[in-house]
Amino acid sequence: MITIKQCFIIILTGNEKDSREAKKKVRKVLYSSGENKKGEFEDIAKEIENAPITYQNINEDWRKQNFVGAIATIYYLHDKELERDFLFHWLFMLLDSDDGTIRYSAVKMITNELGPLTFHLRCPEYEHPQEKVEEYDRILEQLFINLYFSFRNLWDPKYKKYKYVHKLPSCKLKSVEMLLARMRESCGDEYMERLERKLGIY
């Protein structure tokens, strides 16, 4: 049985067809039964941690799509000891890509992080360590700031005619608006309004 590590080797070195097929196999391998899952998870954590450097060294657009798509599939298994936003700088770079497939993968990865980051807001009945609450609030605030200013920079009057986000054509603004909407769903209106007041956004 092929491993996750072998899939990524093919994604990064194979021809276009093999690279695309290896990207699809990542999900199958991830959810298949196997004996050495611990070793697999260690390889996955390394692959995710090194993703920005690996991506930077890829020349072909199709290979970038395959690599980012594969990383998005395994992203939720990143090393939990690292800060939740450790790859956000790279993910925001991907959000600025002209490639819609790459932007979609970035949206997927940031959305994956919203679950753990907002758990203390959605489930206040549980005990949450204060230092974690403060850390996650800091990350959420920074995420909102980045998304808000991206939205301002990308906004164009031509988008006024679209009443709903899903009606927008594929574009950078749509990716940012999708994340803002998902952030509001996860954080709740009251929390988002508090962020807006703090930042002077009305």
Image: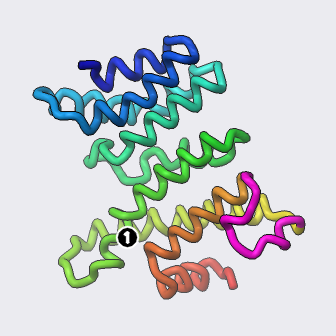
Graded by Cα atoms within 10 Å as few (under 14), some (14 to 19) or many (20 or more), the crowding at tag 1 reads some
On the image, the x and y values in percent for residue 139 come to: 45, 62
Residue sitting at x 49%, y 16%: 18
On the image, the x and y values in percent for residue 152 come to: 76, 65
Q: Is residue 14 left or right of residue 80?
A: right
- Tell me where residue 27 sits by quadrant: top left
**Nearest to the observer: residue 158 or residue 87:** 158
Q: Which element is circle 1 on?
A: loop
Q: Is residue 87 left or right of residue 32?
A: right
Residue sitting at x 67%, y 80%: 201
Q: Which residues are magenta?
A: 158-171
The residue indicated by pointer 1 is 118
Where is 129 relative to 85, above or below?
A: below
Most distant residue in the left direction: 35
Q: Is residue 29 left or right of residue 175?
A: left
> Residue flagged by tag 1: what amino acid is it?
Thr
- Tell me where residue 164 sits by quadrant: bottom right
Where is 66 relative to 91, above or below?
A: above
Where is 17 relative to 84, above or below?
A: above
- The number of callouts visible is 1
Colour mapping: rainbow
Q: Quadrant of the C terminus?
A: bottom right
Most distant residue in the right direction: 158
Q: Quadrant of the N terminus?
A: top left
